[in-house]
Image (spheres, helix red, strand yellow):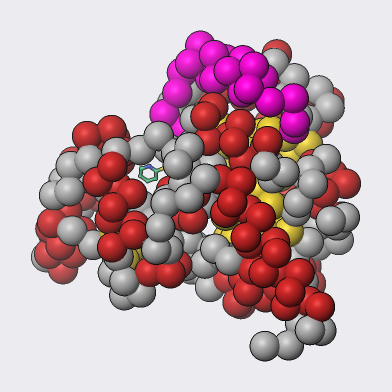
Amino acid sequence: MKTTLTSIIGTKYPLIQGGMAWVADANLAAAVSEAGGLGLIAAGPMDKERLRSEINKVRSMTDKPFGVNIMFMSPHTPDLAAVVIEEKVPVVTTGAGSPGKYIASWKKAGIKVIPVVASTGLARRMESLGADAVVAEGSEAGGHIGELTTMTLVPQVADSVSIPVVAAGGIADGRGIAAAGMLGASGVQVGTRFLASEECNIHMNYKALIIKSKDIDSRVTGRSGGHPVRCIKNQLTREMEKMEKKGASFEELEALTIGSLRKAVIDGDLKCGSFMAGQISGMIKRIMPVKEIIEEMFTEYEKIMSRGGSI
Ligand code: TUI
């Protein structure tokens, strides 16, 4: 498949893996890249030496293009931003903040830069600073989210910039890819579906929760503190909701969630973990190899398009 996105990132399919902090390691990234998408290492919780070692590991597992996701809530961001240059990483995506001050140095190093945005304003700012494409991520997505849904964000971003737009949030099958195309996107970013992949190194409880979850099982907490995060509902999201109703401060809420993503991914702590996942998790019914997930998605997409995109 050729789209304006595949010619930038050099992949077989116009698909980027979500940069899921604590989840997306070299194993998942290499599997996605080897299957024809763009695999990402989530630098999120890593220090620079851990990131360097994950980059080397991906390179030992695949010779296909891959990327690193840098999210701006990490204290290691300046170091991580330097490592991607030193290691000549082909693509960088960013999240949870503006990569403004790093774009020029990444571009100078020949890195393709694809910031994740949740508004047209940030998309335009990223284009003017030299971004190669943007991921427009709607609030159906898991983890840290913006205000707008994928349905409303993607076409507005597509109308606002001339660089390719990648749709994200709620996409887990061929229908989602076709819909993204209709909204003006040149590709998709997929996160939640890869949580239920064989190559994803998360605790079994996390995968089981994705498989078990229904359409209405996710909750957004943290809106009151300005950091809305979507997770599968559990004891932690219920406690957060109670505290937010009582008007708890940002610090009190943070105290409750500190380390909670690690508790989900590593410990499988069903009560106190933050099981970040998108609203589409209700559609995900079994754990599959990454290659089968990607091929199934694009086979279904081709089938829909061969009918002229009608449903
Ligand atoms: O970044 C994400 N999703 C994430 S990051 C993450 S790590 C985390 N760990 C613990 C608690 C909370 C988060 C989990 N999920 N998606 C991309 C994304 N970026 N969505 C929204 C944004 C965003 C929001 C505001 C980007 C920029 C922004 O403001 C930029 C500015 O300065 O105007």
Spot occupied by residue 44 in the image (x, y as percentages of width and height): 47, 32
Residue 201 visible: yes
Q: Is residue 43 magenta?
A: no
**Residue at (81%, 84%) from the top-left corner?**
308
> Looking at the image, which residue sits at the far bottom?
311
Spot occupied by residue 47 in the image (x, y as percentages of width and height): 46, 18
Can you tell which quarter of the image residue 260 is in? top left
Q: Nearer the viewer, residue 202 or 140?
A: 202
Q: Is residue 109 above or below residue 97?
A: above
**Residue at (67%, 37%) from the top-left corner?**
33
**Residue at (81%, 78%) from the top-left corner?**
306
**Residue at (76%, 69%) from the top-left corner?**
302
Task: Report the quarter where the N terminus lies.
Answer: bottom right
Q: Is residue 219 above or below residue 40?
A: below
Q: Nearer the viewer, residue 221 or 37?
A: 37
Task: Report the quarter where the C terminus lies.
Answer: bottom right
Q: Is residue 272 above or below residue 168?
A: above
Q: Report the span colored magenta.
A: 44-65
138 on left or right of 238: right
Residue 128 visible: no
Dominant secondary structure, magenta: helix
21 on left or right of 159: left
Q: Is residue 199 above or below residue 137?
A: above
128 on left or right of 257: right
Q: Is residue 46 magenta?
A: yes
183 on left or right of 244: right
Spot occupied by residue 178 in the image (x, y as percentages of width and height): 70, 73
Spot occupied by residue 281 in the image (x, y as percentages of width and height): 40, 63
